[in-house]
Amino acid sequence: MIKVGIIGGAGYTAGELIRLLLHHPEAEIAFVHSTSNAKNLLTDVHEGLLGETNMKFTSRLTLKSIDVLFLCMGHGKSAEFLTEHPVPQNVRIIDLAQDFRIAGTHDYVYGLPEINKADIAKAQHVANPGCFATAIQLGLLPLAANWLLHTDVNVNAITGSTGAGVKPGPTTHFSWRMGNMSIYKPFRHQHIAEIRQSLAQLQPGFGNAIDFIPYRGDFARGIFCTEVVRIDHSLSETDIVKLYKQFYETAAFTHYVDRDIDLKQVVNTNKALIHVEKIDDKLLITSVIDNLLKGASGQALQNMNLMFGLDEHAGLDLKPSAF
């Protein structure tokens, strides 16, 4: 059994990761670390786990007893934690924050299986992609792989309130969010850098603008994304659909769909669904994911499966909450 440690155990992503790991056939949770919740039951915080576990949070770090460590802390906290708490070299690390997503002076592999599956399988350290970044990239990767991105990319995407994390804030209160919408960080969202990095990986030299406008939605979980790019007149919609189907033919969780897609088809799953429509010289791409699963904890577990030579689906055969 794979022994798992979790740091930052009180947040939404950790809660989802715990839920998945409790039912994983090849993994066992060794500890869930939370200084502020030490000695409290996991179910005191993650009430959805009532009846499934009697584990308690711990403030102790038994890093030598585990095979893999998940870092589920806020952005910037992972690098700080690793500086203060050296992890044994044999322990693999999957970081759910943005600290190591951009290539640099570290050995973290960017954990998007649709383009880095082989590297993830050999990696000691993986940087899990951001939720918006996952949805947006999956809509664009087949175009980049075929050198078809020659203009600016216009993106609109709406996310549920869980995307803001568990800590309450003015824009997460139910009374504010219900029946409401708003934009935030237009054109300057932190996920743009990793999106650009992946597109350039498949289409070197890509340098056009990614005009991304994120929206806060009045639902709890999921991301609904639309992207518009200009495409060569000579390419028919049939040609483009064929490229998408070929690109995702072997992907474990990303699927091209021949009809309109909606959010409920992916909520509570690790799936990503993609649909395209060509109107004149414009291509409309729609992509949907669950921000907490394919956009965070589900993809992190998918990466763990790859790192340990397991079936990508292990612990991730989930049914969408379609009604």
Image (cartoon, helix red, strand yellow):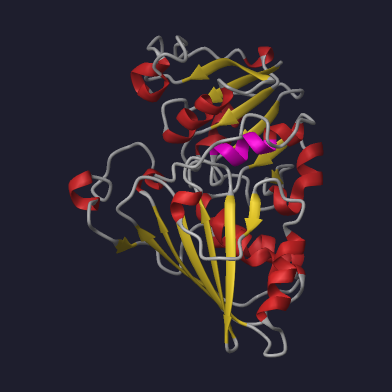
- Give x and y (percent) for residue 12: 42, 34
Residue 108 shows up from this direction? yes
- Give x and y (percent) for residue 65: 67, 12
Is residue 300 a member of the stretch shown in magenta? yes
Left or right of 319 in this view: 167: left
- Give x and y (percent) for residue 144: 71, 70
Quadrant of the rendered image containing residue 303: top right
- Give x and y (percent) for residue 16: 48, 31
Considering depth in this image, is 42 or 170 the residue closer to the camera?
42
Is residue 60 a member of the stretch shown in magenta? no
Question: In which quadrant will I find the N terminus?
Answer: top right
Quadrant of the rendered image containing residue 309: top right
Considering depth in this image, is 290 or 188 the residue closer to the camera?
290
Q: Residue at x 72, y 57 (%)?
A: 248
Residue 144 shows up from this direction? no
Magenta residues, dominant SS class: helix
Magenta-colored span: 297-303
Left or right of 78 in this view: 203: right
Q: Is residue 51 above or below residue 174?
A: above
